[in-house]
Amino acid sequence: MAGFFQAKDVTGTVVQMTFVMSGTNLITGTSTLNLALSDSATPVTVSNFLKYVKSGAYQNTLIHRSNKQTGLGIIQGGGYFITDGTSNLTGNTLGEVYPAYAPIINEYSDARPNGPGTIAMARTSDPDSATSQWFLNVTDNSQTLNSENTGGYAVFGRVLGSGTASMDQIFALPVSNLSGGLGLLRYGAHRDSA
Amino acid sequence: MATVPRSECVVVTSATVVQPLVFTATSDHPEIAAPVLSGTPNSLLSLAYGSSGTANVTVTATGLEGPPRQQVLR
């Protein structure tokens, strides 16, 4: 029935992410994001992301970074999960997403800039080092993360419709820092209790 | 060591592949033409024919965003 119906602006795989904010968060409840992936334009990146999705590796992971600098407004996840049942998190109670598949090549293109509402792969300064961590471009980061920045950061999809409101809600939460065994982590997606 | 209450974090509780469109089909006279959806996702429509006559088959596509859309086949 594809001849009769076509999901607007969707040509590839769609991944649905559910976020839970609870406790004393400024915002409490469940949010859902639908991500339309660019399978044909970035096949390696999408395939890698789907491996983590289908293995369940992203389940119970944290949004561990919220960067609110001018020119780099992002929220980032896919890196850490809670390793125990304690009510208070420290760097030592977080585990990295596992299994970590081999790093992938960078499929960045200036034709797919890091504009608002897009999803891209996080990595080190090595352009071909992305594994599990992803980030959502909340603001227009197209100049900061383009090819002049170590080859650019590969955009491989975008948030559909109302999901951008959920993204903005998470981004609006204050930032606290968490130090410990994993060093300094920025937890943007929770209320600063200080 | 700094700590953060677990309850204050935002947690990704699930990440799954979903279908962008879900289809349903109904007939106002199933004894004449009964719709059958098949395929993955349910995107192939076939009709099981019975007695002669006219039937309206309504196909509804429900997406992740926006209202459902319908197409009537007669």
Image: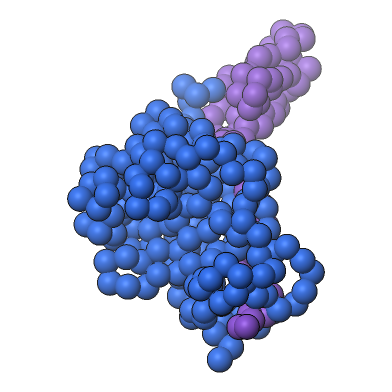
Chain colours: A blue, B purple
Q: Quadrant of the N terminus of chain A?
A: top right
Residue B8 found in image quarter:
bottom right
Residue at the farthest front position: A181
Which is nearer the eye, A39 or B23? A39
Q: How far across and how far down the image is residue A105, in percent?
A: 39, 36
Residue A46 placement, left or right of B55: left
Q: Quadrant of the C terminus of chain A?
A: bottom right
Q: Is residue B65 visible?
A: no
Q: How far across and how far down the image is residue A187, in percent?
A: 53, 73
Compared to residue A73, the image places residue A177 above or below, namely below
Report the residue at 42% width, 44% height from top.
Answer: A129
Residue B25 placement, left or right of A102: right
Compared to residue A19, the image places residue A56 above or below, namely above
Compared to residue A87, the image places residue A16 above or below, namely above
Which is nearer the eye, A161 or A37? A37
Report the residue at 48% width, 67% height from top.
Answer: A65
Report the residue at 71% width, 78% height from top.
Answer: A88
Residue A127 found in image quarter:
top left
Residue A115 placement, left or right of A48: left
Q: How far across and how far down the image is residue A103, in percent?
A: 48, 40
Q: How many marks?
A: 0
Q: Is residue B29 visible?
A: yes
Which is nearer the eye, A102 or A59? A102
Report the residue at 66% width, 20% height from top.
Answer: B39
Q: How far across and how far down the image is residue A100, in percent?
A: 59, 44
